[in-house]
Image (tube, rainbow, N blue to C red):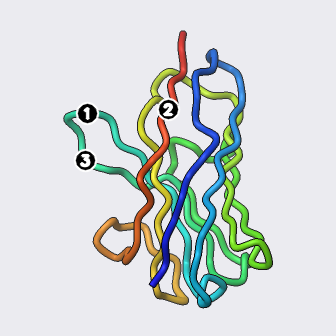
Amino acid sequence: QVQLVESGGGLVQAGGSLRLSCAASGRTFSTYTMGWFRQIPGKEREFVAAIRWSGSNTNYADSVKNRFTISRDNAKKTVYLQMNSLKPEDTGVYYCAAASSIIIRTITREYDYWGQGTQVTVSS
């Protein structure tokens, strides 16, 4: 069992930066692929970024490549999402998720555990 708690969301102007954190509980955090997804009202939850258990591989949605960076600290059981050059279209609720897989996953149904989400609002 893994419990996830996100933090770090807020209101920022376009071009600004935010760093999201996701603190996990559970003994097997280091074996999980971790992902970030986002959702705006009326739309499906969409993949943002994911990182393999070892941190050696990452995957990003095209819309955030070269702006967002996912990282993890297995000793602290925490995964991060550094978001730079934010745009109004990055606005949404950001969710942290864990998948019991050694392969990076990008689809919501492949993830086993979810956090409650943190709101990110980017003003123009």
How much space separates mark 2 and mark 3, taking CA atoms?
Answer: 14 Å
Is residue 26 left or right of 89 when viewed as pictured?
Answer: right
The local secondary structure at tag 1 comes to loop
Dot 2: within a 10 Å radius of its alpha carbon, few (fewer than 14), some, or many (20 or more) residues? many
Write down the residue under mark 1: 41
Which quadrant is the C terminus positioned in? top right
21 or 44, nearer to the observer: 21
Q: Position of residue 100 (x, y in %)?
A: 46, 87
Write down the residue under mark 2: 90
The amino acid at mark 3 is: Glu
Q: Quadrant of residue 55?
A: bottom right
Q: Are marks 2 and 1 in contact (CB under 8 Å)?
A: no
Dot 3: within a 10 Å radius of its alpha carbon, few (fewer than 14), some, or many (20 or more) residues? few
Q: Residue at x 67, y 75 (%)?
A: 57
The amino acid at mark 1 is: Pro
The local secondary structure at tag 2 comes to helix
How much space separates mark 1 and mark 3, taking CA atoms?
Answer: 8 Å
